[in-house]
């Protein structure tokens, strides 16, 4: 953890901005660069890489458009609200040189989350999406700036080496910087990383939003390492499911699970045939056991030490931003407990709790039917039936709260604007664009998504490619929530 402190200190010094009208802002989210690098476990996706190329082409065109329409008095600050790079979703075959540090999970599902492996992933993304990095480098070279807010899919930007690899990928596209130390230093200073949120006092609050999602949140956002192995990120339950079930299973996408029930998954398993269903069941059990292992890992001194480091990082960040730490903690108090905080939430998310409850009830009814008179057995059975129905309804509602964060994010937007005064509270994560008033002079914006994290999703499944633009016109900041329109000017979302 200490290796990252100096780098984080430099980039966080400028994370609190006043409304000094120094910048105009472009804000978008969820590009998922690298979601196409999944061939280690999903080799059939090679046929669908044209979709990823289309995202690159449109993103580059948008960057060019705003470069051409820049205000010399208010250079652009491009704020990317998380998930620019899809470290979690990548399944890259382990490279030579990693043999000594790979665990069994990484050998099966591809490079994982150590600092070295995250850096290798970052370099692979920069190579695959070189045109995007070329355009971003030109954007920064023009005097504009980039602020990267960390999301759940790019939690690996926790590592300083992964951040460094991102910046080096930009510098590589500007050969004029190689012999000009001052110019390179200034260039690099315009690329910043934010572990939680970006804030312009009185105007703009931007975070990814995954901490309001119990399936995707991390126990210790500012120190997201595993108590089992601090060299690795402690993945959320959603991360485990994506790597161990979604990516290796044909026909399983990463979205829409909040609206699916047991019957939907059973039908899907049957459609895979006996062999496919057996593989899916193995992955299902394996991911559940991994999540339960993380729950147990968060009991003990190792987890307590990571919690203390998270609190230390929070206090340090608050000090650098010159904001009271109590305000940070007030926003953090809204975060739901991660699903991996308890055994029951894990089982509930996988429908196992309901299956166990019904199995227990059926066993009791059967056994008591053999042991007690029918006059006692009938009301006991009816009581157990009522209890089972009641538990089923409660469990379904609780699971829905865990897997669908939209209501929690909406409530958090209103509260966050009170804690840290902002006219616009902006998040991503859900892939559903939203712009609505949540309080007097406070607008909640969900940016939707620019790219997809499932390269072989349904045909025609195009992301909305929405983005927020804030420009200073005199003393007033004018906002526009826009949708990219390929070949034409952006249109209102």
Image: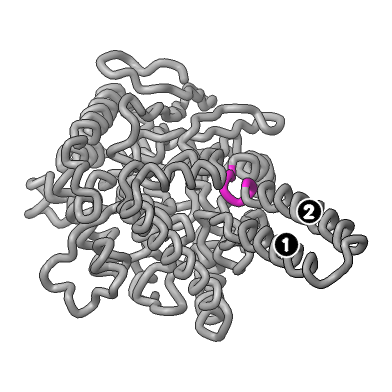
Q: How is the image coloured?
A: one colour
Task: Report the quarter where the N terminus lies.
Answer: bottom left
In the image, residue 390 lies in the stretch drawn in magenta: no
Observer-nearest residue: 377 or 388? 377
Q: Is residue 59 above or below residue 417?
A: above
Observer-nearest residue: 284 or 335? 284
Q: Is residue 431 above or below residue 460?
A: below
Which element type, helix, strand or loop, lies under badge 1?
helix
> Residue drawn 34% across and 76% down?
231
Q: Is residue 462 above or below residue 150?
A: above
> Residue drawn 47% across and 61% down?
236
Q: Is residue 67 visible?
A: no
Mark 2: few, some, or many residues within 10 Å (few <14, many ≥20)?
some
Q: Which tag, 2 or 1, sits closer to the chain's start?
A: 1
Picture coordinates of residue 119 (x, y %)?
Answer: 23, 62
Picture coordinates of residue 299 (x, y %)?
Answer: 58, 80
Most common secondary structure along the magenta stretch: helix
Picture disc at residue 325: none
Which element type, helix, strand or loop, lies under badge 2?
helix
Picture coordinates of residue 120 (x, y %)?
Answer: 20, 61
The quadrant in which residue 341 appears is bottom right
Magenta span covers which residues? 400-405
> Residue drawn 46% across and 55% down?
238
Residue 317 in the figure: left or right of residue 65:
right
Residue 388 in the figure: left or right of residue 452:
right
Q: Is residue 261 visible?
A: yes
Residue at mark 2: 385
Residue 74 in the figure: left or right of residue 162:
right
Residue at mark 1: 361
The quadrant in which residue 314 appears is bottom right
> Residue drawn 49% across and 55% down?
196
């Amino acid at each position: 953890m200490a290796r990252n402190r100096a780098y984080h200190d430099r980039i966080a010094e400028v994370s609190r901005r006043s409304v000094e009208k120094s910048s105009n802002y472009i804000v978008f989210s969820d590009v998922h660069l690298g979601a196409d690098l999944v061939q280690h476990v999903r080799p059939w996706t090679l046929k669908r890489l044209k979709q990823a190329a289309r995202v690159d082409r449109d993103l580059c065109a948008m960057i060019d458009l705003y470069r051409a329409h820049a205000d010399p008095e208010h250079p652009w600050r491009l704020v990317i609200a998380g998930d620019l790079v899809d470290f979690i979703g990548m399944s890259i075959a382990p490279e030579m040189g990693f043999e000594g540090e790979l665990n069994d999970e990484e050998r099966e599902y591809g490079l994982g989350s150590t600092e070295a492996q995250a850096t290798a992933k970052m370099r692979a993304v920069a190579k695959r999406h070189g045109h995007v990095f070329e355009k971003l480098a030109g954007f920064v070279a023009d005097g504009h700036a980039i602020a990267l807010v960390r999301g759940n899919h790019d939690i690996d930007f926790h590592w300083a080496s992964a951040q460094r690899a991102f910046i080096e990928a930009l510098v590589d596209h500007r050969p004029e910087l190689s012999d000009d130390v001052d110019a390179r230093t200034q260039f690099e200073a315009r690329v910043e990383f934010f572990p939680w949120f970006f804030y312009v006092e009185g105007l703009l609050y931007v975070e990814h939003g995954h901490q309001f999602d119990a399936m995707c949140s991390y126990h210790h956002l500012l120190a997201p390492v595993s108590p089992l192995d601090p060299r690795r990120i402690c993945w959320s339950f959603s991360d485990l499911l994506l790597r161990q079930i979604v990516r290796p299973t044909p026909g399983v996408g990463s979205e829409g699970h909040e609206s699916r029930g047991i019957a939907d998954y059973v039908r899907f398993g049957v459609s895979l045939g006996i062999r496919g269903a057996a593989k899916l069941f193995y992955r299902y059990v394996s991911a559940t056991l991994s999540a339960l292992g993380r729950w147990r890992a968060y009991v003990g001194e190792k987890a307590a030490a990571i919690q203390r480091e998270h609190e230390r990082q929070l206090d340090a960040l608050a000090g650098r931003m010159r904001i009271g730490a109590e305000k940070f903690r007030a926003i953090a108090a809204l975060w739901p407990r991660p699903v991996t905080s308890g055994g029951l939430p894990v089982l509930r998310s996988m429908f196992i709790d309901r299956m166990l409850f019904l199995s227990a009830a059926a066993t009791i009814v059967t056994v008591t039917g053999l042991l007690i008179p029918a006059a006692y057995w009938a009301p006991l059975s009816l009581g157990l039936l009522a209890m089972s129905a009641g538990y089923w309804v409660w469990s379904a509602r609780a699971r829905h709260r865990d897997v669908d964060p939209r209501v929690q994010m909406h409530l958090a937007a209103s509260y966050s604007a009170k804690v840290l005064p902002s006219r616009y509270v902006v998040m991503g994560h859900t892939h559903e664009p939203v712009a609505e008033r949540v309080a007097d002079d406070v607008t909640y914006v969900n940016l939707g998504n620019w790219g997809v994290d499932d390269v072989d999703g349904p045909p025609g499944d195009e992301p909305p490619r929405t983005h927020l633009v804030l420009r200073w016109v005199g003393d007033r900041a004018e906002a526009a929530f826009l949708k990219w329109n390929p070949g034409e000017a952006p249109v209102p979302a």
